Each structure stands twice: as C-alpha cells, then as structure tokens.
Image (cartoon, rainbow, N blue to C red):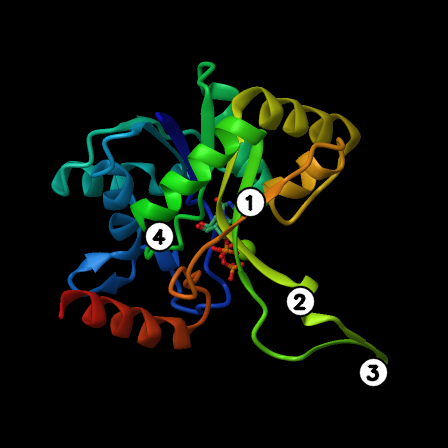
C-alpha cells in the first residue's frame, strides 16, 4: 500500500541544547535527519516525502539531500511556530493521496515493518498511530500529591508515525486551524472530530531524540542493529 510522508523538521531543539537544530547532530557518521529520511527513501511503498523546514535552513538541508541521494522529497515548505503548523504547511501543499503519514524527523529508528502495519491499518480503518505500553506505574499528581493511580493496562505512550486517510487528516487540520485548536499530535485533531483512532504496537527503540541522553541511547541502538 502506497503512502506519502510528512516530516516536520523545523524545530529548534531547545531541550537538546546543542545551539542548533538537533536534526543536524551526527549519529554514526550521519545527521539524525538523514537517518530518518533514509528509512522512507528505501521504502518502496513511500511515493513522496514532504519536509517542513526553517527558511534559513532550507539551503543546507537541500545540500544534505543531494549529498545523501534522498530523491523522494517533493516539497520543503516553511515550518511554523508550532509543530502542528509545520505539519499543516506540508498538508496544504500536497496533492490528494490515499494515505498520509506524519512522522517526527527526530525519530530516526522507525522501521519499515511498523510503517507497513500503520499504513495497512489506516487504509482499512481511517486512522492509526504508533505507541508502546507504559512500563512504569502511572499516577496522576496535583500539587505534589498523588490524586490517583491510573490503571496501567489502559495507558500507552504515543509516538509517530501517525497514519491517516488523507481526507480525514486534511479535514481535521482545517477545522483545528479555523477554531484555533492546538494539539500535541495529529491524532488529537482527528479524535476531536469523533473519528476512532487505532493504535499499532510499535517499538521502545522508536525514541524521539529530545535530550542529550537520547544521543547515547541512539548510538547504542545503531550499534545493536549493526551487530
Ligand atoms: N518541529 C517542527 N516545527 C516546530 C517544532 C517542531 O517541524 N515548530 C519538528 C521538530 O523538528 C521535530 C519534531 O517536530 O522533528 C518533534 O518536535 P520536538 O522533538 O519537540 O523538536 P524541537 O521542537 O526541535 O525540540 P524542542 O521542543 O526541545 O525545542
Ligand atoms: Mg518542540
């Protein structure tokens, strides 16, 4: 099943504290951004990549794409203030496709198997997102005091990719923009329109490179994979 992917890459990487976009940091000789792009470049079912970028980084990113033979990029629109705006600027430029995936450029360890499961699920059911089961005991805390111990069986930690039939995501983003709703992922926008969003069990390796500790874990994941 074919799909196109939107990769928001226009963040600042403040929590990484590298003084530049964390996607340009190197893991095993390659920028994080290139690790992520290669997964989609090498997936025969991926027919197009849309990359939201900061205007001042477009030229550098274009050079990286050429250098690493990333040929599937169809557009590099300007990102926005928030991640949701960056995703929306890509969706607005895309032609209609059947399935669209949204994936954080900062999650370089996504695998083709998980992508295929998400695409298949979204094709049949409309919306499917990657997640893993919560590992720790989970409690709700207010003013430093436990309010409730939440049943862990019901709790999932949500990742990307998030996959949708194009029309559903397009509508959800359009409505969110019109009413000024800001979500922390695409599924939230779709959920509030009443569509069921299905979960696909993904991998604990599919981390988002967010703080410096993640660089160490990232190197370890790559080492494990090359063994
Ligand atoms: N992103 C984006 N546009 C924004 C903010 C984030 O395209 N306005 C992208 C990031 O580049 C990243 C993904 O969304 O690939 C997930 O965001 P996050 O991990 O929060 O990255 P940053 O916003 O760059 O990091 P921080 O929040 O620490 O500044
Ligand atoms: Mg951010």
Across and down, in percent, residue 158 comes to 57, 56
Foreground mark, 4 or 1, reads 4
The numbered mark at residue 146 is 3
Q: Quadrant of residue 61?
A: top left
In the rendered image, the quadrant that contains the C terminus is bottom left
Foreground mark, 1 or 2, reads 2
Q: Quadrant of residue 106?
A: bottom left
- According to the picture, the residue beneath numbered tag 2 turns out to be 153
Tell me the SS state at disc 3. strand
Foreground mark, 1 or 3, reads 3
Most distant residue in the bottom direction: 145
- Which circle's residue, 4 or 2, is located before the other in the chain? 4
Above or below 14: residue 58: above
**Contact check, label 1 and label 2, Cβ < 8 Å:** no
- Which circle's residue, 1 or 3, is located before the other in the chain? 1
Q: Image check: 24 left or right of 126?
A: left
- According to the picture, the residue beneath numbered tag 1 turns out to be 83
- Ligand 1 within 8 Å of disc 1? The answer is yes
Tell me the SS state at disc 2. helix
Instruction: Out of 54 and 160, give the one closest to the viewer.
Output: 160
- According to the picture, the residue beneath numbered tag 4 turns out to be 110
Across and down, in percent, residue 188 comes to 68, 43
**Contact check, label 3 and label 2, Cβ < 8 Å:** no
* C-alpha distance separating marks 3 and 2: 19 Å
Q: Quadrant of residue 206?
A: bottom left
Above or below 9: residue 157: below
């Amino acid at each position: 099943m074919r799909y196109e992917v939107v990769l928001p890459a226009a963040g600042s990487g403040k929590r990484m504290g590298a003084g530049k976009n964390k996607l340009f940091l190197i893991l095993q000789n390659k920028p994080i951004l290139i690790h992520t792009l290669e997964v989609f470049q090498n997936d025969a079912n991926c027919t197009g990549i849309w990359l939201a970028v900061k205007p001042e980084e477009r030229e550098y990113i274009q050079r990286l794409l050429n250098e690493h033979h990333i040929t599937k990029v169809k557009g590099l629109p300007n990102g926005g203030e928030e991640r949701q705006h960056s995703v929306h600027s890509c969706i607005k430029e895309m032609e209609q496709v059947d399935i669209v995936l949204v994936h954080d450029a900062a999650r370089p360890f996504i695998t083709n198997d998980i992508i295929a499961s998400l695409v298949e699920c979204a094709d049949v059911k409309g919306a499917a997102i990657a997640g893993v089961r919560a590992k720790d005991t989970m409690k709700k805390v207010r003013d430093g005091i436990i309010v409730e111990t939440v049943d862990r069986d019901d709790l999932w930690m949500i990742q990307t990719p998030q996959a949708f039939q194009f029309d559903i995501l397009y509508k959800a983003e359009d409505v969110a923009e019109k009413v000024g709703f800001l979500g922390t992922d695409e599924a939230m926008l779709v959920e509030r329109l009443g569509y069921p969003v299905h979960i696909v069990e993904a991998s604990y390796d599919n981390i988002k490179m967010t703080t410096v500790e993640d660089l160490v874990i990232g190197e370890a994941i790559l080492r494990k994979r090359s063994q």
